[in-house]
Image (cartoon, rainbow, N blue to C red):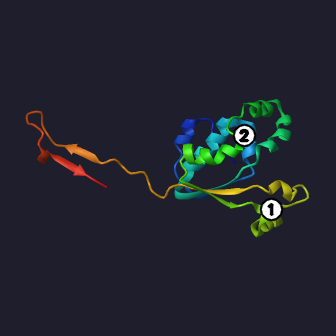
């Protein structure tokens, strides 16, 4: 087992696409409280990097008011809580505008649907009240288009002659 939150942005940038779908259900509060805004940004950027073109990210973020009770667990959690600037209600915009996801759509708010009833049957135990899981679930999609490679221009010339149009080869996709 390993920590999904990498220790540096360089490690995040080196990630290669591997997955078609990544789920992030009920963990944003813990990432945020343990690693602050840096951690939540790395979580989102790493998720994006790990998704193949056209891949899906399913996110259920906990609301900020749910952080308050848990911030008291340790001084570090409390410090991270007090420094948060990227609030959960800003996640959707951040994922679209800064991370690079192409689309976002609301899948469901479980307590109000048949999907919610099925989820609650799977996860609802005496230790978990279903009222705590009445949060919206969003689907973010990475563009199916791959990054276009730049066109290359190859110049075949020697220092003794001028470059003419016949010496230039255009290489395209």
Q: Which residue is mark 2?
A: 32
**Dividing the picture into quarters, in which one does residue 163 lie?**
top left
Q: Which residue is mark 1?
A: 111
x, y percent for residue 97: 55, 45
Secondary structure under badge 1? Answer: helix
Residue 168 in the image, given as x and y percentages of width and height: 17, 46
Residue 103 percent across, percent down from the top left: 56, 55
Q: Image quarter for residue 124?
A: bottom right
Quadrant holding the C terminus: bottom left
Of all residues shown, which one is farthest toward the left? 160
Foreground mark, 2 or 1, reads 1
At a point 34% along the width and 47% down the height, the residue shown is 150
| Left or right: where 60 falls relative to 156 | right
Q: Left or right of 121: which side holds 168?
A: left
Q: Residues within 10 Å of mark 1 (few under 14, many from 20)?
A: some
Q: Give the number of the disc on residue 9.
A: none
């Amino acid at each position: 087992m390993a920590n999904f939150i990498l220790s540096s942005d360089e490690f995040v940038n080196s990630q290669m696409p591997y997955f078609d779908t990544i789920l992030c259900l009920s963990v944003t509060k813990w990432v945020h409280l343990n690693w602050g805004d840096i951690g939540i940004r790395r979580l989102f950027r790493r998720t994006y990097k790990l998704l193949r073109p056209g891949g899906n990210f399913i996110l259920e973020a906990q609301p900020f008011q749910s952080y308050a009770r848990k911030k008291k667990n340790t001084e570090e959690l409390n410090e991270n809580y007090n420094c948060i600037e990227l609030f959960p209600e800003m996640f959707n915009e951040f994922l679209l505008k800064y991370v690079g996801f192409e689309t976002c759509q609301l899948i469901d708010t479980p307590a109000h649907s048949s999907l919610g009833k099925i989820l609650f049957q799977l996860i609802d135990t005496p230790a978990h009240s279903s009222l705590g899981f009445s949060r919206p679930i969003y689907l973010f999609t990475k563009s199916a288009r791959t990054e276009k490679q730049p066109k290359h221009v190859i110049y075949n010339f020697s220092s003794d002659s001028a470059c003419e149009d016949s010496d230039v080869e255009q290489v395209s996709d």
